[in-house]
Image: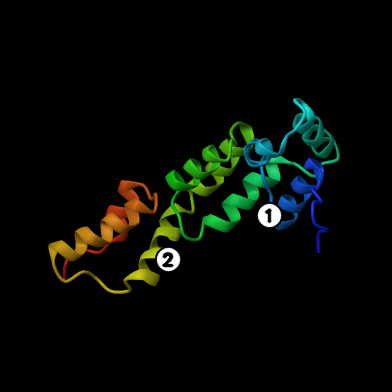
Amino acid sequence: MNKPGFQPSLKGRALRLLSQREHSRTELERKLARHEEVPGELAKALDELQTRDFINDGRAVDSVVHRRSGKLGNARILQELAAKGLSGEAVAEAMADLKDSEPRRAQEVWQKKFGCAPQDLQARAQQMRFLLSRGFNAEVVRRTVPDIE
């Protein structure tokens, strides 16, 4: 596809990454920094893409929430958003929207993974640790995992 020795521009590399999924500006800076040959070149390319709305942190937040909310609790989703350099009003709004659905999502994850009540304390603890590791709130986990039969 590419000719030998051909190096795509920073803008081209950014567009290729954006064509695969939404990225935050911080993510793109992190991924493309090693390809920057002239200081300021990357910032200029990303500014242009942001001006044209190719980079939109609000869409990046929505994308992460949409992709991960079916498997993860609010704490893990917030952690992923922070790792991608996303914060502010869009993140706060998304997290507020997710707060009400966390018990339902925890129940769905538990049902898919385990499907039946634990037989002993060890099994209950394992099920609770699993949901906690997925980022679900401790109170939600306590209410989701049934007592021992």
User: Does residue 136 appear to the left or right of 93 in the view shown?
Assistant: left
Graded by Cα atoms within 10 Å as few (under 14), some (14 to 19) or many (20 or more), the crowding at tag 2 reads some
Please say if 137 is above or below 108. Answer: above
Q: Residue at x 75, y 45 (%)?
A: 14
For disc 1, the marked residue is: 21
Which dot, 1 or 2, sits closer to the camera?
1
Q: Position of residue 21 (x, y in %)?
A: 68, 54
Label located before the other in sequence (1 or 2): 1
Secondary structure beneath dot 2 equals helix
* Residue contact at pointers 1 and 2, CB within 8 angstroms: no
Quick one: SS at disc 1?
Answer: loop
The kind of residue on which mark 2 rests is Glu
Residue found 27% across the figure and 55% down from its top? 129
Is 1 in front, or is 50? 1
Quarter that holds the N terminus = bottom right
Instruction: Specify whether residue 133 is in view.
Output: yes
